[in-house]
Amino acid sequence: MEWETRITKLFNIKYPIIEGALSGIGNVGLAVPVSEAGGLGMITALNMRTPENLREKIQKAKSMTDKPFAVNFSPTMIPKLLDMLDVAIDEKVPVIETAGSQATEFGKKIKDAGLIWMHKVQTVKHALTAEREGADAVCIMGMEGAGLKNPTMLTTLVTIPLAVKQLKIPVVAAGGIGDARTFLAALALGAEAVLLGSVFCAVKECPLSDKRKQVLVDADPYDPRWRDPILQTPKFEDLQKLFEAKGTKEILKAAGKAEDFGIPKEAGTYAISLAIGFIDNVPTAKELIDKMISEAEEILTKKGIGGFKLA
């Protein structure tokens, strides 16, 4: 099957699958295999700590693949990342994602450079603002997702179709997506790609230790130790106070610890969503993507959905 959407054409990727920005672990070693497998891999600028290191890693990614990849900037976490944006622009990174707070200054610099800008938000209101400011695409995360929460955000099932009804630019769905069924569900809701975080934390190329990956395999999304902090992670104001207390240097060093978000420490990352329920083994990034696509194609052409299937 051809998995062509406005996002696959805009980003020049084979499948409408994007690796989420994984604070603390999103690096070249993970991003490149995702891109090579037909998705869009992503390097997290915060993890690179300095502009010089970011440039080195971008150049390394270019030497390892001729496929597109993205770099993420989260100005909510640390505004000084603006200094690193100049590096990504200078290196002509194919896609630049911003996330968190309103990223007007980031977006203007990206668009002035003629690069593709995707902004990640948590509400339709903020998505519409990003569209007005020139974003080429928006990613909207439902409350099942990882990281900071907005008190007005809704579930992925509800927020994506609400967004699609109002936005002209393509929408990427995030939050609780981790297998073929949730992938297809997001597309049926009107999304033109999905952004996956948790399931990429448990692939072989992820820099987390084997022990931590096994923790994710064993994790139960019904367990309050996982469910409650995922659904109730700190509001921006609370986390900002925490980061201000730590200082910029410590933030760059830790890139946000699991326990800062209430996630069990043994996970080794706070980039965990309710999609942990779909983690049952530790495949390669290619195996994960290939399985998701092949099972989605089987559902559409053989098994059908709700008694209906493609002719």
Image (spheres, rainbow, N blue to C red):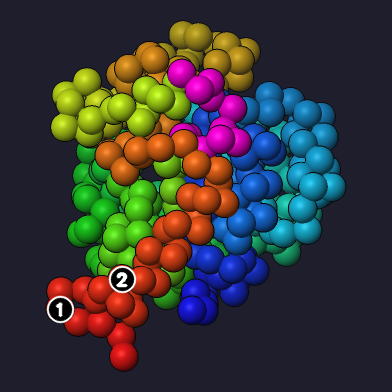
- Looking at the rendered structure, the number of numbered marks drawn on it comes to 2
Please tell me whether residue 238 is drawn above or below residue 16 in the rendered image: above
Please tell me whether residue 53 is drawn above or below residue 164 in the rendered image: above
55 falls in the magenta region: no
Mark 2 = which residue? 299
Farthest bottom residue in view = 311
Residue drawn where x is 59% and y is 27% of the image: 207
Is residue 68 rendered to the left or right of residue 304?
Answer: right
Q: Which residues are magenta?
A: 201-211
Residue drawn where x is 50% and y is 9% of the image: 246
Quarter residue 272 falls in: top left
Identified by mark 1, the residue type is Gly
Residue drawn where x is 25% and y is 82% of the image: 309
Identified by mark 2, the residue type is Ile
Mark 1 = which residue? 307
Query: Can residue 14 be seen from the camera position used here?
Result: yes
Q: Nearer the viewer, residue 3 or 286?
A: 286
Measure how far apart labels 1 and 2 are at the Cα level.
11 Å
Q: List x then y, in percent, for residue 68.
A: 69, 58
Quarter residue 253 falls in: top right
